[in-house]
Amino acid sequence: MGTSILRTQRRIGRGSQRSPVHKHRHVGSTSVPGLAAKPIIDLSVVSEAEDVPAAIEALTAIGGYAYMGEMGIPHRHAFRKPGILPARNLYVSLNGCQSIRNHIGVRDICRKDQEVRETYGRAKLELSKREWESVDEYCEAKNDILTWVLEKAGVSSEDGSK
């Protein structure tokens, strides 16, 4: 899976050369070795406020990615590419926004703290045994554990959601 992540990051970089992009980050559970994860890669292109529209336009130009809007998470613009394996979620995030702070905070604390990584992983595995009506329902069920992880990371969260 690592090679696929690098290819995707290089492709984002090529596409985003047409717009100023602050940085791009591999976030989400697949970015943490040893953490239980669905086979979905989460990548976030981080842009300054004035560059977000141009970054969205540049990423839309990469063949097959569909712009999905903010999907209820302020300052995080989602993209999907159906049929690509491994599946990936691609985001343009405003530099410093709550969403990117949460993603980076969870990723970094889980990478460096085995207790947090294992506790979060067990919670995710437990939740994966249930049937969910929607992704939103699953995300809502993760709020308590994510709030704890964010506290361990020292990230203040407006609402504890990722």
Image (cartoon, rainbow, N blue to C red):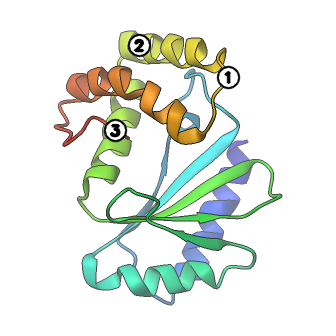
Q: Earlier in the sequence, mark 3 or mark 1?
A: 1
Of residues 1 and 60, the one drawn nearer to the viewer in this rendering: 60
Residue 154: which quarter of the image?
top left
Please give the name of the residue rendered at 73% of the width and 50% of the height, measured from the top-left corner.
87
Within 10 Å of disc 2 (Cα), the crowding (few <14, some 14-19, many 20+) is few
Q: Could you tell me which secondary element the residue under label 1 belongs to?
A: loop
Q: In this figure, which residue is indicated by the disc labeled 1? A: 131
Q: In this figure, which residue is indicated by the disc labeled 3? A: 161
Q: Which residue lies most toward the front here?
A: 133
Within 10 Å of disc 1 (Cα), the crowding (few <14, some 14-19, many 20+) is few
Q: CA distance from mark 2 to mark 3?
A: 22 Å
Q: CA distance from mark 1 to mark 2?
A: 28 Å
Instruction: Say if 97 sits above or below 58 in the image.
Output: above
**Is there CB contact under 8 Å for labels 3 and 1?**
no
| Relative image position of residue 1 (x, y in whole percent) | 73, 42
Is residue 160 visible to the viewer in this orientation of the structure?
A: yes
| Relative image position of residue 97 (x, y in whole percent) | 25, 58
Is residue 20 visible to the viewer in this orientation of the structure?
A: no
Q: Amino acid at mark 3?
A: Ser
**In the image, 36: left or right of 28?**
right
Instruction: Say if 62 sits above or below 24 in the image.
Output: below
**In the image, 32: left or right of 7?**
left
**In the image, 108: left or right of 81?**
left
Point out the frontmost of discs 2 and 3. Answer: 3
Point out the image quarter for the C terminus: top left
Q: Amino acid at mark 1?
A: Glu
| Relative image position of residue 116 (x, y in whole percent) | 37, 15
